[in-house]
Image (cartoon, coloured by chain):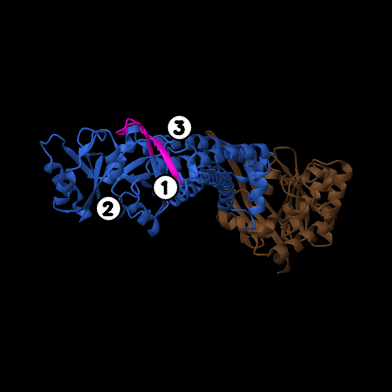
Chain colours: A blue, B brown
Amino acid sequence: MKFAPLVLSNLRRKRLRTALTLLSITVAFILFGYLAAIRVGLGAGVQVAGADRLFVRHRVSIAQPLPISYLDRIKRVPGVRAAIHQSWFGGIYQEAKNFFPQMAVDPEPFLDMYPEFVLPEEQKLAWLRTRNGAIVGRSTATRFGFKVGDHIPLQATIWRREDGGVMWDFEIVGIYDGADRGTDTSQFFFWYDYLEEGRAFGKGLVGWYVVKVDNPDRAAEVAKLIDDEFVNSSDEVKAETERAFISGWVNQIGDIGLIIRAILTAVFFTILLVAGNTIAQSVRERTQELGVLKALGFTNRQVLCLVFAESCMISCLGGFLGLGIALLLISAGDPTGGALPVFYVPVRDVVYGACISVGLGLVTGFFPALRAMRLEIAESLRQA
Amino acid sequence: MSGTDDLLVNIEGVTKYYRRGAELVHVLEDIWFQVRRGEFLALMGPSGSGKSTLLNLIGGLDRPSRGSIMVDGLRIDRLNERELAAWRARHVGFVFQLYNLMPVLTAERNVELPLLLTPLTRAQRKRHVAAALAAVGLLHRKKHFPRQLSGGEQQRVGIARAIVTDPTLLLCDEPTGDLDRRSGDEILDLLQLLNREHGKTIIMVTHDPHASARATRVVYLYKGQIVTEMPK
């Protein structure tokens, strides 16, 4: 600690240079924070996807519906504990840009299947007795100001009504929360029976099935049995774990993790050069002063540590500042207005960020510190 | 016996050369001389005669190619880097021609630098710094940065930094070389005071006969060898 004033005073030596270096590191870490949140947002569901849940869809495409009659057959497959169906509604609330996912389900088995959706008991009971009742996740309710008791009109883009109309009326009977931070609370669920009774076509069809298995270790085996159950039928299915399905869905726009890693590698490599050059230049300018410190009795190792302390202080200041700003900005919520239903920086990524900032300091300070350590006193004093 | 006790620096057969490519450049050749405790010795000679190199060797800033250097009974040419650094911190105070103060530190922070290597507490360091600055008459300017001080004042801060650890030996490399006559005289007065009143042993490299006149003994170097020794 007693060397801190010495380290800090060296950072104040060229204030503009230090400020610009700090700024570049700060911006890099804001980007790091944002990309971490985007990765979480795009992969929403992957982390929380149940290991004991299978996703069963039409073999051709998820857009192809499946007969509701499959439900009982799936339930009879050995190793299956429970099964539910879901159907995509795809309605528009006021304007097309107000997107949030809407799904028709059977309420009771659905809530049993997804314990991560936390709904107060009285709201659950209200949903079970309200035919056009719907529950909505906290983030969407907050986004649009939905309250229990509100009537929400949705304009169908797929399911025209029997009377030829496209407007569907739903009553919000519950607002659910996520059991943890990674749970997607942007979705809207309503009675499948309400859809089935009112739609003009597609009766007896569902979008996909979600299956809970007895033993997660046998999930692949059960998936194979389900596939085999419907082989050579008119609607063959593809069963896979929920996590595999969501990962595949996200990766349709590319390997998100790889893209983000590539961007961050480029950013941090650039920062490495910028900060490294700043520290190297600062040490070169102080060759004589470092020689004086050694003449006064500072050891090579102490001089090495002083330079490392400087480089680490710059990178940690910039890194922590950047992470702090990123966390502050990200806490304001999804900047896309709905495309990233889960948007936060996991603690693990904050820890990674902190480690990277320390690592950046050590790497950028390495060669200048080595040079400072190896300085010959007499030689450096001659540079006066 | 008392003669041996008085001996502070004993240099025997010291040679120093540098390798420049395949060529050996001899800077000092077979130097033998001694400095007694309490002496104020001036090292004189033309540029390139090896004065500063000899001073660096005595201060443990460089190592001899051959020969031995004993200071206060310790063979410093045999110490490793860490031991030598610790020895310098404890026993040697350096005064440089260009003051070599840290421009980003105030006068008191500059003087405090050698004390950072000691186990002293912050309060103790503060007391030592105040005493050293008072000894050079600059306590009132302790909060000033080097750029806010005149050349003479900067050199006095340099001297305060050199004496703050109460070293055995004060090594001055052209301490008045960058100062006008009046400021130079003030610095020489101060060195003389430290020598006479506080018993500090001083070795001073200088070109200036006016400065060497203040010393108790002058040693002349010419082409890396001691050519004359003139006790004053």
Q: Residue furthest front?
A: A163
Residue at left 68%, top 47%? A9
Q: Chain of mark 1?
A: A
Disc 3: CA contacts within 10 A as few (<14), some (14-19) or many (>=20): few
Q: Position of residue A148 (x, y in %)?
A: 45, 50
Residue A151 falls inside the magenta stretch: yes
Residue A73 falls inside the magenta stretch: no
Question: Residue A172, which numbered label?
Answer: 1
Amino acid residing under circle 3: Glu
Range of magenta residues: A150-168
**Badge 3 vs badge 2, beta-carbon distance below 8 Å:** no
Question: Residue A95, which numbered label?
Answer: 3
Q: Nearer the viewer, residue A181 or A117?
A: A117
Q: Relative to B65, is A206 on the left or the right?
A: left
Question: Pointer 2: what residue?
Answer: A109
Distance of mark 3 from mark 1, alpha carbons? 19 Å
